[in-house]
Image: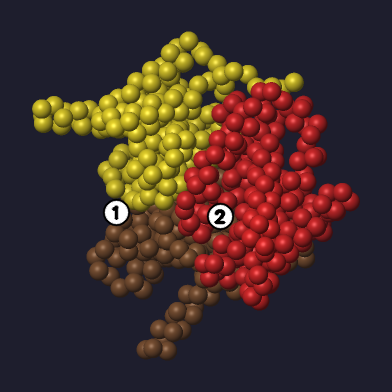
Chain colours: A brown, B yellow, C red
Amino acid sequence: MTTLHALGQQSLFALEMMAVLAGALSGVLGALRQKMDLVGICVCGFLTAFGGGVVRDILIDRRPFFFVEHQGVLIAVLAISAGSAILVGRRGLESGERWLQVPDAIGLGLFSATGAHLSLTLGQPPLVAVMMGVITGSFGGVLRDLICNQIPVLFSDHRPYAICAAAGAAAYVVLSTSGAAAELSIAACVLVATGLRLPAIRLDWRLPPTGTA
Amino acid sequence: MTTLHALGQQSLFALEMMAVLAGALSGVLGALRQKMDLVGICVCGFLTAFGGGVVRDILIDRRPFFFVEHQGVLIAVLAISAGSAILVGRRGLESGERWLQVPDAIGLGLFSATGAHLSLTLGQPPLVAVMMGVITGSFGGVLRDLICNQIPVLFSDHRPYAICAAAGAAAYVVLSTSGAAAELSIAACVLVATGLRLPAIRLDWRLPPTGTA
Amino acid sequence: MTTLHALGQQSLFALEMMAVLAGALSGVLGALRQKMDLVGICVCGFLTAFGGGVVRDILIDRRPFFFVEHQGVLIAVLAISAGSAILVGRRGLESGERWLQVPDAIGLGLFSATGAHLSLTLGQPPLVAVMMGVITGSFGGVLRDLICNQIPVLFSDHRPYAICAAAGAAAYVVLSTSGAAAELSIAACVLVATGLRLPAIRLDWRLPPTGTA
């Protein structure tokens, strides 16, 4: 049982690392599209990979940041950002862009669970916990777009992303406040968030239109 | 007397809520002009309504945020943001836009007083207290404009807004450090800030031009 | 010896103030180029002068900010921002722009040392200390560009600036963790960062190109 638990922990960490690196590559691609230099590429990779957690930690006043505690992951993100920009380049990254959506969608579920969990731990109300889940899961891309001088895709592409994170985080909040085990609540969050996001991409779902009359 | 005091507190809260909702609607309009989706509309409504206080609280390292303490107001802001975008739409909001300037101008005075008050409570120097008043009263719109990928109106429309907040906050700081009662200091801040802002709109006052020679 | 030490401290403070004011003027120029009003000019001057330290202090959760502790410097920055915009104007500032690069390059070294120092004091790992040095030395301009609705020059001009700060901060970290005296570590940081930045400007060095294939 302990071995099984340890195996579960390791799988979780491996999934999170895949999602972090998918975020970094998405940031690098955004930077390359704006013809940024190596500094901008590393900052964009860093912000897209770690930015959601950094914004959440600033809002809930929590330190140290993940990247401060795990210097190894920070080094990996910066090295992969610079390396992929130099060795792979924009066209290469674009050709693999759609494959990044799978680890990204898994990360959306995992990070939303983390954000909701930390918020509930502080005694914050349910809706705030859902917001913190959404921010953790999706605001790395918002920071990338701000730096790239563009309206954040998260706010303007009319496709479900933050909504998937919100649904997953809501599932987490309901289960967790009902006394469910942490593993079950996390699994439910990933199932809902990732399980909504993947078909949303595949079937090109759209958000309801807003009145522009 | 106690009844009168309670009545005053309730009126103050009602005025603040009107100003918060006017902020949310201004954010929704900004988001609709950028053709954002429902997620962007809610984020813009949220940031314009609560953003000034959030920036101030991050700067003075104060928690919990207002929206964390008052989940009901958070729900109202998000519901009104989504609802007004779907039911009223851009044209409808634009037709009422000038009427939003009155609760907004009252909020400018009230929130500037709050910011200056919290800063003084921490023992910060007078000019910083004025800055915190200005930020509380006017930086929600700055966050809205950043998200909407535009140069903040607050910094570029050559009309008095931050200046009105600064004058009100300065009145608050002078009275408060002279030992005046809180009610008197707040009233003076609103009188000065709102009392400058309303004629500034009506009479189209401009800031002095800056050298572009 | 005490007199010599005091003289050193005073020189250091004078150099820092020159760098802060050079930052303010660079912010004013950015604001004038965007035709901002007096409020935008003061905010841009403030952010470029103090913004790197503010971002670092938010990230490492340190208060009070430098400008809160030194109201006199805050007054000077705001007065020089407004005054230079009105009295000197855009053309005047542009004609002196290249001379600002010298105090700015000295500030790059000094502020990078400060950031790395504060980070190490908190027990943060070496790479994070270098990052905090770079942020302190160079993120004022990033905030200026965000407010001016432009892709930050720091991320896109393909010229060494953050890299110089990183090299200086790395020198600081190596010396400081080897037990060198603070004065020596600071001097090394300035020598490396400023000593790379000045020839980089003069000889128009470029960063290695990134794959846009």
Query: Looking at the figure, which quarter contains the C terminus of chain B?
Result: top right
Look at the image and tell me whether residue A10 can be seen.
yes
In the image, residue B34 above or below residue B75: above
| Residue hosting label 1 | A125
Q: Secondary structure at mark 2?
A: helix
Q: Residue placed at 59% from the left, 31% from the top?
A: C79
Q: Position of residue C96 (x, y in %)?
A: 79, 34
Residue at figure coordinates x 80%, y 57% from the top left: C195
Q: Is residue A170 left or right of residue C126?
A: left
Q: Is residue A159 left or right of residue C104?
A: left
Q: Nearer the viewer, residue B26 or A210?
A: B26
The label on residue C56 is 2
Q: Is residue A26 visible?
A: no
**Quadrant of residue C22 within the rendered picture:** top right
Query: Which quarter of the image is occupied by the N terminus of chain B?
Result: top left
Q: Nearer the viewer, mark 2 or mark 1?
A: 2
Residue farthest toward the right in the current orientation of the protein = C203
Side of B109 relative to B204 (left or right):
left
Q: Are marks 2 and 1 on the same chain?
A: no
Q: Residue at x 38, y 32 (%)?
A: B173
Q: What label does residue A42 carry, if any? A: none
Report the amino acid beneath label 1.
Pro
The residue sitting at 69% across, 43% down in the picture is C18
Which of A158/C22 is in front?
Answer: C22
Q: Quadrant of residue C114?
A: bottom right
Q: Chain of mark 1?
A: A
Q: Would you call the spot at circle 1 few (<14 residues within 10 Å), some (14-19), or many (20 or more)?
A: some
Type of the residue with mark 2: Arg
